[in-house]
Image (cartoon, helix red, strand yellow):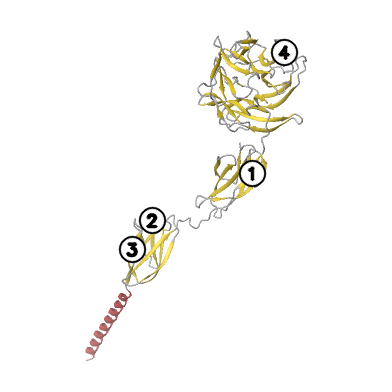
Amino acid sequence: MKNNMKRVFTIFSIAVLSLCISCNEDTIDLLGVGTVTGRVVEAETFEPIENAKISLNPSNNTVFSDEKGYFIINEVEAGDYSVTVTKESYLTNFKPATVSTDLVVNVIFEMEDHNALNKPPSTPVLITPEDGVEDQDLSIEFIWSSSDPDDDSVIYKIELKNDLNNDILKFESIVDTTFVVSDLKYGVKYFWQVAANDDINEEVLSKVGTFKTKVNPENRYLYVEKSDNDNNIIVSANFNEGDGIIENEVQLTKEDQNSWRPRKNKASNLVAFLRTVNNETHLFTMSPDGSNVFQVTDAIPVNGYDLNEIDFSWSSNGDRLIYSHYDKLYVINKDGSGLELLYKTSEGSFITECDWSNDESMIALKTNDIDGYNVSIYTISMSGNILNTILSGVEGAAGGLDISIDNKLLVYSYDTSEYKSTDRRQLNTHIFVYSFMTLTATDISVEKEVGTNDLDPRFSPNEAEVIFVNTSNDGVSTKSIYKMDIVLDNANNTRLQLFENAFMPDWE
C-alpha cells in the first residue's frame, strides 16, 4: 500500500513540475517582440546615407542602411533601447526607442557632417596700414590679426580696390597674417579687405580699410637696371647732391618683362621705351609712374644691329616718334597711327641711333655695318638730305647721340682706340661735344679713369652738364651713371657718380 502511495506522489510531483515549466514558457512568450525600422539621411540635403551602422543598446543588434538609407531590425524584444547610428565623416547620432510587442518603431536619423560643430576663424582685424592713413609708399606690408578656435589651418585673401577705376588686385593663398604688396600707384586712395577661410566654414570678411599712397615725386632721372632673372627693368629716381643720396627710387616696369631705353617727353608727359613682345622689339609708352602702358609699334618692329644699342627719339611736342628698322627710319604717331618711312640709307648700312632736333628741322643718325663698325654720324634734313657729317671713316665703335635744344651742339661717344673685335668690346671710349658752329669736336672725357669707357651721353636739362655711363673696358664689370660739367675750354671737367649698377640714363 505504501509503495502505491509513493508511486502516486511521484506521478503527482512530475505533473506539477511539468505544469510549472509550461507556465514559465507561457510567461516568456507574453514579453513579445517588435521591429525597429528607420532611415538615415543628410541633415542639410536629406539625401540618403548608405552603409551607416545602426546599433541597439543593450541588445547589441547591428545592421547597415541600404542604398536609400533604410534599415530594419527584426525580432527585437519588447523594451526600452538606445538606437545609435555611426558613419565615417559624420557626427555619431542616437535616439531612444521603445519596442512593443508586434509593433513597428520607426526612427529617422538626420546626420550632420563631422565638421558641423567646427567654428569659423575669428574676423580679421586690420592693423597696418591704419585706416585712413595717407602718404604711403608704393610698397606696403599689410598686417592683420585672426585666429581659429579649433586650431584649423587658415588661408587668407586680400582684395585691393581703388578710387580711379574698377581694377581689383587679388592676392590669395596667404598662410601668414602679413603680406607685402608692391607696384602700387602714386596718389591713389585704396580700399583693402581680408578674408579668412578654414576650408570648412564660410569665409569670414574683415571690415574695409582705406589708405592713400604718396603723391608722385616727379623724378628727374630715368635709367635701367638688371633684374634677378636678367631682364632689363626701368627705374626712376631723384639724386640729392647735398647729401649724396638717392631719393624716391621707383621701379616702373615689371621684372618678368624685358624693358629698356627710357626716353621721357615733357610735352606729352609720357615715357617711351623698348620692350620685347613675342620675340620682337616694339616701342611702348607709359605714364611717369609706370601706369597706362601702351604699345605704339606693331606692323614694323624696332630692329637692327644690336637692340641694346638701338635708340629712338620723340618729336619736341610729343605727338610722334622716330625709330629704325635696319636701314630704314620711320615716323609714327604716339597712338600707333600714321606710320611713314622717313629715310633709307643709300648703302644699306643699319641705322642704330637717331635724335630729332627740338625745332624738328634735322635728325642726327648713327649708322654702322652688320658688325657694328664702319660707323658714321651725320645729320639729315626732313627731306632726307645730308646736312653735316660729324664722324666717318673711322675704325672704332661710337654712339650716344643727343642734339642740344638750340641745335648748336651734338654729344656722342667714340672709342678712340679704334679697336675692333667679334665681341664688339670697346677699350677707350670718350665723350665728345660737336659744335655745328665751328664744325669741331671737343673731348670732354679728360678726367676719365684709364681702362674705362664713357658711354651713352645725354645733355642735362640745362645743357651745362652731361649724364653718361662709365664702366671698365673689360665688358663685364659694374656700370654706373655719372654726370659732369661741359667745359669746352678747360681740362677740368668735374665728375659725380649718381647711380651704381645702372645704365641707359635719361635726365629731364
Callout 4 amino acid = Thr
Indicate which label's residue lies in the foreground, 4 or 1. 1
Q: Residues within 10 Å of mark 2 (few under 14, many from 20)?
A: few
**Residue 476: which quarter of the image?**
top right
Indicate which label's residue lies in the foreground, 3 or 2. 2
In the picture, measured across the screen, residue 497 lies left or right of residue 204, that is right
Callout 3 amino acid = Ile
Give coordinates of residue 350: x percent, y percent.
Answer: 56, 14
User: Which of the labelled discs sits on residue 178, or is there none?
Assistant: none
Q: Residues within 10 Å of mark 3 (few under 14, many from 20)?
A: some
Q: Secondary structure at mark 4?
A: strand
Q: Nearer the viewer, residue 153 or 5?
A: 153
User: Which of the labelled discs sits on residue 72, or is there none?
Assistant: 3
In the picture, measured across the screen, residue 464 lies left or right of residue 374, that is right
Q: Residues within 10 Å of mark 1 (few under 14, many from 20)?
A: many
Q: Looking at the image, do the residues carrying marks 3 and 2 touch, with CB atoms under 8 Å apart?
A: no
Give coordinates of residue 506: x percent, y percent.
Answer: 66, 24
Indicate which label's residue lies in the foreground, 4 or 2. 4
**Residue 137: which quarter of the image?**
top right
Q: Nearer the viewer, residue 42 or 9?
A: 42
Give coordinates of residue 139: x percent, y percent.
Answer: 63, 38
Q: Which residue is mark 2?
A: 47
Q: Which residue is mark 1?
A: 211
